[in-house]
Image: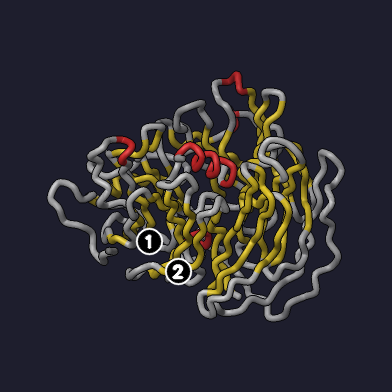
Amino acid sequence: MQKKLFLRLLFSCIVLSLLLAACSSTPPTTTGQTPTSGTTPGATATAGGAKMPTITPVSTTAPEPPTQTNCPAAGTARAAIMAPLALGSHPNIVYTVNEFQGNTPTFGTLKRYDVTTRNKPEVVKLPGSITNAQISADGQWILFVTYSSFTSGTVKLQLVRMDGKGLQTLYCANGNSIQGPQWSTDQKLVVFGGFANGIATVYLLNISNGNLQAELTTSINNGIAGFNIRTWLDNTRIYLTNIQPDQPPDMIYILDTSKGPNQHISDLTTVVQKTFGDFDSSFDGTHLYVDYGLCGQGGCFPPGKITVEPATGGTEATVLNSPQYDTVAVRAVTANTLLVLIRNDQVAGPNADTSHNGLWKMNVDGSGLTRLTTDAAHTLSALNGNSQYPWSNVSRDGSMYALEPINFQANVSSFTLVFGSLNGGSPTTFASIADGTQLNITGWTTM
């Protein structure tokens, strides 16, 4: 069952090669077992930085001009047509619902959950499967990939406005050839991966004019099986990690798109050169938080450790030291707040201590470690695997989080989506299913 879950996460969040992993308002205080925090010299952050651009709201919705959903000519892309949408004030969580007949995808749906009214309107429903969905910085648009099959057929990079209008196809490819797309916060550039004939390629698509170019290429004979495209540092630089067969990544790179097309590994900036589990850039884009907790075929097991260093590499300092509990994910979600997932697996040992499993928050300097959720037995919790921007996991006002608890005890996994307050308290379930349908958080907007 864990293998099936891993495959689901691989297709729906290609940027990750590992599974991510009664609530209390304060962390446990058991001597020698509770993770301990350190300090983060200079790691202060301010709102409106690289990850949270200044957005000017629009007051009037413009009619969406005619758009095309057919594929552009092979090897070419299409410019996006994006008429503005006036957003409301209700926090909304966007999520995907993917239905299957056996292992064959049948329908994919983008839905919204209105936290205020509890309504669940559909944004769009399409044949096949919707993956890699992410919300634009201004909250008005959703970028996503549609598959008719995970192994063959046409794959489309598509865009739709939050009100369901303006569905359009920007690019098409065959097979699993649009991997891990990431959208810049200025909403002009999309980077995604592809693989053909032993060559791994990172493509850069300018959706303002439809220009598509190969930004980076490498042969798998170079000791790398490809790249995972993780997250933009700013509007020209993006983090990549290496893919290694049957083992976690051990390299974090920066690809600078301002250097132009046809780059090679030697053109990349190397930020980290040792095995790690997860990472995220700080709220203002000046620092990098690296999680050295690991999950493998034997599950997730301690120790866990989170460090901070300059965003482009340098001396690191310990933020969180967790000798008894594995840290499996870290996200910088506000100017002062990190989200951390802790997970010990029973598969790693029959006596694994799972008492701390769940979502925690802490300050960017490592202080104030506080529990937000507790994982039930046979359950793992995951943050958004498709995008690492703050609004992918936390509401636009920074007050609420969204989380995906997945129970894998039965033959068919049970998917649940919850949200809760970053101030603590019990989370609220807003979607749950256990019939083979898969649910995933896309992110937050307002409507």
> Percent position (x, y) of residue 258?
66, 43
On the picture, is 370 further left or further right than 417?
left
Image x and y of residue 152, in percent? 72, 36
- Whichever of labels 2 and 1 marks the residue nearer the N terminus, that label is 1
**Amino acid type shown at disc 1:** Thr
Q: Could you tell me which residue is drawn at 33 percent across and 37 percent down? A: 347
Q: Residue at x 79, y 50 (%)?
A: 210
Whether the residues at callouts 2 and 1 have beta carbons within 8 Å, the answer is yes
Please name whichever residue, 57 or 22, is drawn nearer the observer in this view of the structure.
Answer: 22
Work out whether 388 lies above or below 160: above
Q: Which residue is mark 1?
A: 337
Q: How many marks?
A: 2
> For this view, does 134 lie left or right of residue 78?
left
* Residue 358 x %, y %: 34, 54
Is 218 placed above or below 353 here? above
- Name the colouring of the figure: secondary structure
C-alpha span from label 2 to label 1: 9 Å
210 or 379: nearer the viewer: 379
Query: Who's the residue at 81% across and 39% down the image?
Result: 75
At numbered mark 1, what does the secondary structure look like: helix, strand or loop?
strand
Which element type, helix, strand or loop, lies under badge 2?
loop
Q: Is residue 337 visible?
A: yes
Q: Position of residue 328 (x, y in %)?
A: 38, 45
Residue labelled with disc 2: 398
Q: Name the outermost residue toward the left.
A: 31
Image side of residue 368 versus residue 142, left or right: left
Decide: is 162 above or below 254.
below
Along the line of sight, the residue nearer the viewer: 15 or 80: 15
Mark number, residue 89 = none
Viewer-proximal residue among 107 and 62: 107
**Amino acid residing under circle 2:** Gly
Residue displayed at 23% across by 43% down: 324
